[in-house]
Image (tube, rainbow, N blue to C red):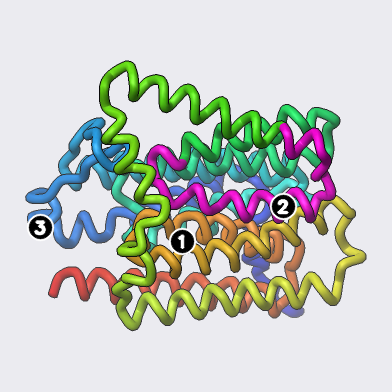
Amino acid sequence: MRPARINITKFFTQPSAINIAISVIVGALLFNAQLIMHNEQLCSSSVQMLFMKHFVVWSLPMMWSQILGFVAMTGIMVWMMFLCNQLQIIPVRSSMPLTIGLVMAGCIGYIQPFDESYIAAVFFILAMKELIQMYHFETQVAAAFNITLLLGVAALFEPTYIWLAVLFVLGMIIFRVITRRVFLSILLGIITLSIVVGSLFWLFDSLDILVNYLNRFIDVSLWYDMTLTKDDIIIGCFTGALILFTFINYYFSPSNYKLNTRLNFMFINWGFWLSMIWVVAFGAEFAQLIAIPGLFAVMCLSLYFSMNQSKVANVLFVVWFLVYVGYRIMHNYSFGN
């Protein structure tokens, strides 16, 4: 009698208390590994939450920032799990976004301390939700206005987010929702946000702060000034290769997906590659920006592993996990030295 084959991807796809608990525990261990191993070094530093790169909202010891970061990341990935189901990013109920998201976040130390990049990412996700819903609902004009406001608010925390407007325009082209009224709604959103923000800074006699912040949108000193380790480059190339593999797999099996899932996947795949170019272009802000291509990677990989329970998919899932854990171990070792 042949022994039963363990299907890992099937286990983590089906939502249950056990696999969600395993995902959270593994994520917590990976997320806080650096905190456990280098407690004294981390306790001596702090992390600031900034608004417009000028106003200090708060300053927390690194230890508490890491813990708060894990709680916030868990909440974001639970939210993504429900969004992927609600928006038909994944056509089956799946807890894979939580598993993949927490493992990736737990292994990429740059995105772990809780700072303004978390707030900007939340507004980005809200804008992305509005974009994907434009295909399903008739309120496309209102959605375009909301997207403009949400992306503008995200840019108040991370100025380079303004360049992600290109990605949303591409998304509107993919979903075929660009009309004259949608275009006018975007312009109205820009004008509204400009008037509100400009008026507030004028009332508080702080227009110089606003001007200095706006200059960061085109600050060439942020371009290409990136310092990466060999491990960072390897994990980036590995993730890119996986995303390319998911695209090839999708290309040869498009009939497995409904039209809205295919359009979602096309947008998400483009989102990953364009956001990677964006991260490279603004290399000096790498640590604050890498979460966005990471978010697209979570959605791409979650779709593939949720829809594939083959032997190849299971092996690939194990390889993906081991490579990321290996990257985390090397990162911890480098930090300690």
* Vertical order, 6 against 201 (above or below): below
Q: Name the residue under label 2.
A: 171
Q: Give the left or right position of residue 297, taking residue 248 as reference.
A: left
The front one of 277 and 268 is 277
Q: Name the residue under label 3.
A: 41
**Image disc number at residue 104:** 1
Residue drawn at the location 59% of the way across and 71% of the way down = 317
Q: Give the left or right position of residue 173, taking residue 236 as reference.
A: right
**Between disc 1 and disc 3, whose residue precedes?**
3
User: Residue 306, percent across and down?
Assistant: 71, 59
Give the alpha-carbon distance from disc 2 to disc 1, as whole Å: 25 Å
Front: mark 3 or 2? 2
Residue drawn at the location 37% of the way across and 54% of the way down = 288
Front: mark 2 or 1? 2
Q: What stretch is highlighted in magenta?
A: 155-184
Residue type, label 3: Gln
Regarding residue 70, the answer to whether it shows in the image is: no
Residue drawn at the location 21% of the way across and 45% of the way down = 47
**Between disc 3 and disc 2, whose residue precedes?**
3
